[in-house]
């Protein structure tokens, strides 16, 4: 009798020892003469339980976690291979509350399958979207994506269908699809989880995009900080090529789409689409002026679709089940689901895919379980290093693009970083300016110089120097950055800085002088 | 053959193999750094010539990207995350500990040549903050104690 065991290959699980667990399980099984099939799956995204080991039983998959190497002998003694009781037993994986309450569309397969097994992918609804797309006209595919209401999940929330339509209608011999996999925002890891946990869904999404707009070449611009994703993507691309899902004649349709992974080199700015294209062209990642839009004149001057990983990975299910199916999730103009990432000082950090509309408070407490340290949550930064800090009074904001922007906050890529009451918001604001200075491409003056002046001024404020002069100076500087920068790096760094100043003036030493700010 | 001429042959071979890719410069620089641990200044004219670029253009690209380095790193490079999520979980204390323990600041290498320390802005391990990378190994929920254990372990490997 053979047993099937799952140990995640996700890099967060590995960072907590998953590789050592896998080795130890294999070794112990061998010692006991037990035949096991060890599958390295993606992560379910319940990171406080990682490494999360699952075993296949007649009742379904049973989870154990968090497993340490010292637990392996006792797990075998408890007959965990057949779902035996153990202190680490969590019961049926699918019944775990955190997972059960989610609406996983883009993440439907992640954690269930072997990420680089094409057979697994095909047996779990993989390539159904592409099959449908191959039977549709280009305009029909674009219409399905437009109807779904999908908006760019990288942060800008631009309607994906409109972008595709522009590229479709721009005549050119050569067009490109670029996947922006330069997930640089702190607190975000959903792109990484997709690339490591279900790389074929991204490949399928890009292939559909290529067919839809008439592009035969795609690039995945991947950040160099993601070595595991790099390996998973290259393995999956090779398998897709061999099986005719990529290449010059996709599934006998006569249509071509080739895909290559290109590595970034540690520049945050290259997550900005025009800077990314400069980088792909082999140049310094300087931001370009817009117009022309990349959809008209993008990579090497050709019409180019640039989409985030999650946007592209959401396309297969839209083409499989229809635009209306996807659009039926969500609220207002935010349709479908958003994979939220709970991070920082939070008890149950992880991946939570939900239809738009739940409040931030529900996410933080019903899913997140409050802070990891048990102290009150003081502030939450949503949307990465260019997103505002939300104080407790804003926790009832629904997770919806428009509701967030109405508050002068940013939903962005769905990264949520919690801070407890030991956080000093003035120091965080200083860091935000310093980060902007380190990562500025240098093309526009407000960002290049304003960011350095920004942390210098905050240093003076923290030192208590002449607040009556320096606080208005900081606000004035933020105003210049907001309105005068070429791209979102300079243009949005004021969001965290000013939100920290507005909501937590005490941390800047101005509590008893309300008129100063 | 001298060390530097071996190095130049490596750079030449890499450049010849990759120069016809569209936008070849970054793939070439990655391959050079993978092979040599850094991008030596002497490789700049070789790459520039093959790609029909000026040396200034190649130098400009190398210096733009934080990841590329033009000096020899230590035997192991430690990338420590400085970003918000790690800060929320004691990243600054960890940073102090690491700098004290190694006796170096960011962008420096220990005098015994064993470790280089570089900041990184997010490793995508934010659910397990604070995070760091030693070589290609990623570590989550790093404490001063687990950092010491990790470098003791990798010191044995060095």
Image (cartoon, grey):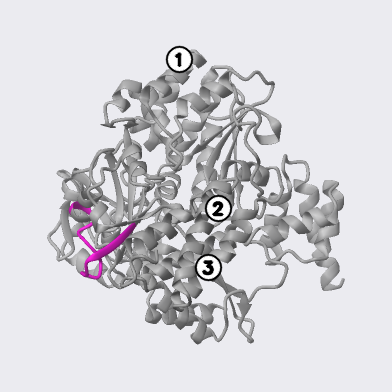
Question: Mark 1 — residue?
Answer: A140
The mark that comes first in sequence, 3 or 1, is 1
Mark 3 lies on a secondary structure that is: helix
Residue under label 3: A455
Residue B5 in percent (x, y) is at: 86, 67
Q: What's the residue at 58%, 51% (across, down)?
A: A269
Q: Which residue is rendered at x = 39% and y = 78% of the image?
A: B146
- The magenta-colored residue range is A366-380
Are discs 3 and 1 less than 8 Å apart at CB? no
Q: Is residue B79 above or below residue A335?
A: below
- Compute the Cα span from label 3 to label 1: 50 Å
State which quarter of the image contains the N terminus of chain B.
bottom right
Instruction: Say which element carries label 1.
Output: helix
Mark carried by residue A386? none
Q: Quadrant of residue A450?
A: bottom right
Name the chain under label 3: A
Q: Is residue A280 visible?
A: yes
Which residue was labeled with disc 2? A480
Percent x, y for residue A160? 46, 29
Closer to us: mark 1 or mark 2? 2
Question: Residue drawn at (23%, 55%), measured in percent from left and top?
Answer: A393
Q: Position of residue A37 (x, y in %)?
A: 33, 51
Mark 1 or mark 2: whose residue is earlier in sequence:
1
């Amino acid at each position: 009798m053979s047993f099937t065991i799952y140990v995640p290959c996700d890099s967060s699980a590995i960072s907590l020892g998953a590789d050592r667990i896998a080795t130890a399980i294999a070794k112990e099984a061998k010692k006991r003469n037990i035949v096991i099939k060890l599958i390295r799956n993606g992560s379910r995204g319940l990171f406080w339980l990682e490494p999360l080991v699952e075993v296949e039983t007649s009742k379904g998959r049973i989870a154990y976690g968090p497993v340490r190497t010292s637990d392996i002998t006792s797990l075998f003694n408890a007959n965990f291979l057949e779902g035996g009781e153990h202190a680490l037993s969590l019961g049926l994986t699918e019944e775990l509350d955190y997972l059960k309450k989610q609406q996983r569309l883009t993440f439907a397969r992640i954690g269930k399958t072997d990420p680089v097994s094409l057979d697994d992918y095909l047996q779990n609804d993989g390539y159904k979207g592409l099959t449908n797309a191959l039977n549709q006209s280009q305009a029909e595919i674009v219409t399905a994506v437009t109807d779904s209401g999908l908006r760019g999940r990288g942060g800008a929330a631009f309607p994906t269908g409109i972008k595709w339509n522009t590229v479709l209608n721009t005549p050119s011999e050569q067009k490109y699809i670029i996947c922006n996999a330069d997930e640089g925002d702190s607190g975000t890891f959903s792109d990484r989880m997709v690339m490591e946990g279900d790389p074929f869904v991204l490949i399928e999404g890009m292939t559909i995009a290529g067919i839809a707009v008439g592009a035969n070449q795609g690039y995945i611009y991947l950040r160099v900080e993601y070595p595991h994703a790099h390996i998973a993507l290259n393995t999956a691309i090779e398998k897709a090529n061999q099986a005719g899902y990529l290449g010059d004649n996709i599934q006998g349709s006569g249509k071509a789409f080739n895909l290559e992974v290109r590595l970034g080199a540690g520049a945050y700015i290259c997550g900005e689409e025009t800077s990314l294209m400069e980088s792909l062209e082999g140049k310094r990642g300087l931001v370009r002026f817009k117009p022309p839009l990349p959809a008209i004149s993008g990579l090497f001057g050709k019409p180019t679709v640039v989409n985030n990983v999650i946007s592209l990975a959401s396309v297969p299910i839209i083409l499989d089940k229809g635009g209306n199916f996807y659009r039926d999730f969500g609220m207002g103009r935010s349709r479908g689901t958003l994979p939220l990432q709970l991070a920082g000082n939070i008890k149950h950090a992880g991946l939570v895919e939900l239809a738009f509309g739940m409040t931030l408070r529900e996410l933080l407490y019903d899913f997140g379980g409050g802070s990891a340290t048990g102290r009150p949550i003081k502030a939450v930064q949503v949307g990465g290093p260019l997103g505002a800090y939300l104080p407790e009074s804003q926790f009832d904001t629904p997770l919806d693009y428009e509701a967030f922007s109405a508050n002068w906050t940013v939903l962005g890529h769905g990264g949520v970083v919690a801070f407890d009451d030991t956080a000093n918001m003035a120091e965080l604001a200083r860091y935000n300016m310093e980060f902007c200075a380190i990562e500025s491409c240098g093309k526009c003056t407000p960002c290049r110089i304003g960011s350095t002046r920004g942390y210098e001024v905050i240093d003076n404020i923290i030192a208590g120097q002449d607040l009556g002069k320096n606080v208005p100076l900081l606000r004035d500087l933020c105003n210049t950055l907001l309105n005068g920068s070429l791209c979102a790096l300079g243009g949005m760094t004021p969001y965290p800085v000013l939100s920290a100043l507005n909501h937590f003036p005490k941390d800047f030493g101005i509590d008893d002088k309300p008129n100063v700010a | 053959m001298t060390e530097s001429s071996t190095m130049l042959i490596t750079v030449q071979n890499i450049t010849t193999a990759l120069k016809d890719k569209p936008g070849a410069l970054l793939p070439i620089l990655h391959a050079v750094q993978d092979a040599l641990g850094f991008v030596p200044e002497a490789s700049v004219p070789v790459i520039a010539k093959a790609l029909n670029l000026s040396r200034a253009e190649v130098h400009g690209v190398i210096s733009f990207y934080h990841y590329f380095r033009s000096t020899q790193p230590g035997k192991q490079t430690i990338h420590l995350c400085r970003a918000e999520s790690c800060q929320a979980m004691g990243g600054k204390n960890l940073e102090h500990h690491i700098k004290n323990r190694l006796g170096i600041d960011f962008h420096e290498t220990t005098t015994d040549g064993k470790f280089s320390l570089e900041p990184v802005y997010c490793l995508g391990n934010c659910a397990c903050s604070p995070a760091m990378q030693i070589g290609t190994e990623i570590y989550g929920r790093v404490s001063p104690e687990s950092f010491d254990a990790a470098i003791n372990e990798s010191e044995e490997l060095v």
